[in-house]
Structure formats: structure tokens, C-alpha cells
Amino acid sequence: MIIGKKTRLRPIEKDDLTRYVRWLSDPELRSYLNQTLPLSQAQEEKWYERNLQAGYEQAWAIDAQPNDMAMGPWQHIGSCSFRDIDWRIRAGEVGIMIGFKEYWGRGFGTDALQTLVAWGFYSLNLNRVTLRVNADNTRAIRAYEKVGFVLEGRLRQARFANGAFGDELLMAVLREDWARAVSETEVQPLS
Ligand SMILES: CC(C)(COP(=O)(O)OP(=O)(O)OC[C@H]1O[C@@H](n2cnc3c(N)ncnc32)[C@H](O)[C@@H]1OP(=O)(O)O)[C@@H](O)C(=O)NCCC(=O)NCCS
């Protein structure tokens, strides 16, 4: 388990999968994720079993406490992951989804991503973390900027959602930039 300030990241359990199926039945959420079709329970379970064996994606469940005083039982609200890790370049790509819409815009996504990125730099010894995002996903882009990601490129009309093409942005944070930001804000990194 990895503990953040407002969230904790833990391995995904089989019992969590029904929530992913429910969340991904929402077309709005899928449009942000560039995922056209909803997923069935059987598909989720297949992904889970294959990933357990092959480990191509390091996926974490995001838990949060329902009120801002960080009190009460932990609730599963989404997931985040590292994938496509290149151990020679020491680079990896992250993805994140808060499936529980009531938790959008309350700082949980930023905290979970900060925690994941800290894990990437301090525990996986990565040097570069990247992500891809729809150019019109302003809430996600703002959250990514707060974690330290900067714009590196724009793929024009690389996405299609809600009947229209849209651009995809490539963003990245380097370990040196992130470490500087951490020391300036005096945030204690993960050990
Ligand atoms: C993207 C996501 C992870 C962000 O997490 P979050 O907890 O909602 O975001 P946070 O509250 O940490 O930060 C959002 C920031 O954007 C701002 N914001 C919120 N809604 C916004 C909107 N509609 N437009 C612009 N900015 C917005 C918030 O004010 C906040 O910035 P601030 O702290 O400077 O005020 C989450 O919203 C999510 O999972 N959305 C659906 C799936 C998705 O988009 N995944 C990303 C795919 S690349």
C-alpha cells in the first residue's frame, strides 16, 4: 500500500472489478478515457487474470475517505497505473481515473497522481513519467500541471469522441524537475 495525503493506493482485488464495470458503463467517463465500448464483468476479469500473470500494467486501486477531514471508512473511488515502463530509458506512462464522480474536482486525483509519481521516482527509480490526455479535458490537465507535468506535444485529431475529432496532448515530468518542486514546497518524498 502507498499512502498519500488524501488517498491511498493499494493492489486491485477481484472484488473491486464490479465497480470498474459500473463506472465504465458511463459514456462521459469513457469519453475522457478514449474508451468506446463499456466493459463486461467477464472482460474485466480476463484483464485482471492476464495482468496478474503478465504484469504489463502496474495498476493500483485509489481509496479515499469521504469527508475532507480524512475521517471515516476508506472508499474505493478509482484507479491509476504505470504501463509501458522502459527500464533502460527509465521512463513510464501513467493513467488515472476517478470513477466515482462525486469525488471529481476535490483534489483526490491530484493527490493520487502525486503519490503514484513519487512511487515511480523513488521506488521504481524512473527518470521520466509521461501521460496522454484529451486536449479538451481541462480538469485533468490542470490536475497534471499541479503534479508538475508539462506539455511536450500535441497530436492533432488523434482522438474521436462525441462525434468529433479532438487533439491529444503529450505531457511529462522529469525526476529533476519534480525533485526541485518537492524541495521548494518542502513536501516530504516517499521513503
Ligand atoms: C482527471 C481526474 C483524475 C482529476 O482528478 P480530480 O480529483 O477530479 O482533480 P483535482 O480536484 O485534483 O484537480 C482538478 C483541478 O482542475 C480544476 N477543475 C475542476 N473542474 C474543472 C473544469 N471543469 N474545468 C477546468 N478546471 C477544472 C480544479 O479546480 C482543480 O484545480 P485547482 O486545484 O487549481 O482549483 C478526475 O477528474 C477523473 O478521473 N476524471 C474522469 C476520467 C479522466 O478524465 N481521466 C483522465 C484521462 S487522461
Image: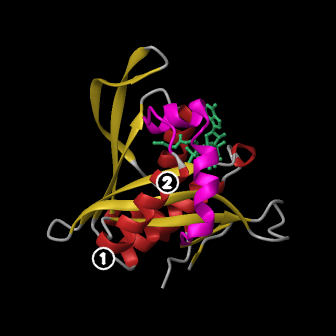
> What span is colored magenta in the figure?
11-39
The numbered mark at residue 87 is: none
Q: Mark 2 points at which residue?
A: 42
Q: In this picture, is 69 found above or below 21?
A: below
Question: How far across and down, in percent of the image, does residue 167 sit?
Answer: 35, 25
The numbered mark at residue 125 is: 1
Secondary structure found at label 1: loop
Q: Which image quadrant is residue 122 in?
A: bottom left
Amino acid type assigned to the residue bearing label 2 in the image: Ala
Q: Calculate the distance from the C-alpha at mark 1 to the C-alpha at mark 2.
A: 35 Å
Q: For ligand 1, give the image quadrant.
A: top right
Of all residues shown, which one is farthest toward the left? 88
Judge whether residue 107 is colored magenta.
no
Q: Residue, x 84% and y 65% (percent of image)?
A: 69
Q: Which image quadrant is residue 92 in?
A: bottom left
Q: In this picture, is 52 found above or below 130?
A: below
Of 102 and 26, the residue lying toward us: 26
Does label 1 or label 2 sit earlier along the sequence? 2
> Horizontally, is 134 left or right of 172 in the view?
right
Q: Residue, x 84% and y 70% (percent of image)?
A: 71
Q: Residue, x 47% and y 39% (percent of image)?
A: 33
Of all residues shown, which one is farthest toward the top? 163
Question: How far across and down, in percent of the image, does residue 178 sit?
Answer: 40, 63
> Horizontally, is 7 left or right of 157 in the view?
right
Q: Residue, x 48% and y 48% (percent of image)?
A: 144
Secondary structure found at label 2: helix
Q: Residues within 10 Å of mark 1 (few under 14, many from 20)?
A: some
Judge: label 1 CB < 8 Å from ligand 1: no
Amino acid type assigned to the residue bearing label 1 in the image: Asn
Q: Are marks 1 and 2 in contact (CB under 8 Å)?
A: no
Q: Which image quadrant is residue 139 in?
A: top right
